[in-house]
Amino acid sequence: MNMASELWKSEALVHQYLTGVRGAIPLAAEQIDVMLRVVDSAVEDLRSIADLGCGGGVLSAALLERHPQARATLVDFSEPMIAEAKSSRLVR
């Protein structure tokens, strides 16, 4: 495995990303809104979500808020990111 992918296994880096960098991504809210509109236009009754490379679970949380009947499976190779998704209450 390369060095860059190992970095995402660091709790310190994940914390720094989620508390600082993520909030500074230009147009992040607009990106999620576009993804929600694409899903809404493609699927009438969303029942399952596969969020690959889920990070802290922000996209899954937005999808589940819009489609509360859906079930989500979140996957990430970074254990600290998965732990954040589980503990953040963004994802139920």
Image (tube, rainbow, N blue to C red):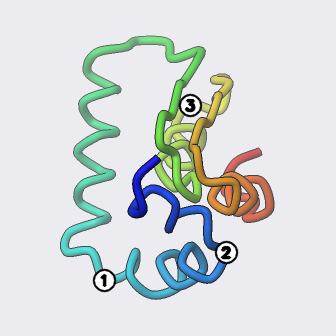
Q: Position of residue 85 (x, y in %)?
A: 68, 55
Distance from disc 3 to disc 1, alpha carbons, whole Å, reads 27 Å
Residue in view at x 54 percent, y 24 percent: 49
Disc 2 marks which amino acid? Answer: Glu
Picture disc at residue 24: 1
Quarter of the picture containing the C terminus is top right
Report whether 13 appears left or right of 43.
right
Mark 1 or mark 2: name the one nearer the start of the chain: 2
Residue in view at x 63 percent, y 23 percent: 70
Q: Could you tell me which secondary element the residue under label 2 belongs to?
A: helix
Disc 3 marks which amino acid? Answer: His
Q: Nearer the viewer, mark 1 or mark 2?
A: 2
Disc 2 target residue = 11
Q: Position of residue 87 (x, y in %)?
A: 80, 62
Q: Nearer the viewer, mark 3 or mark 1?
A: 1
Disc 1 marks which amino acid? Answer: Ala
* Contact flag, marks 1 and 2 (Cβ < 8 Å): no
Number of marks in the image? 3
Q: Position of residue 29 (x, y in %)?
A: 31, 64
Front residue of 76/25: it is 76
Distance from disc 1 to disc 2, alpha carbons, whole Å, reads 19 Å
Front residue of 54/63: it is 54
Front residue of 92/52: it is 52
Disc 3 target residue = 67
Mark 2 or mark 3: name the one nearer the start of the chain: 2
Q: Is residue 84 above or below residue 37?
A: below
Residue in view at x 31 percent, y 83 percent: 24
Report whether 71 appears left or right of 41.
right
Distance from disc 2 to disc 3, alpha carbons, whole Å, reads 31 Å
> Which of the 4 quarters of the picture holds residue 77?
top right
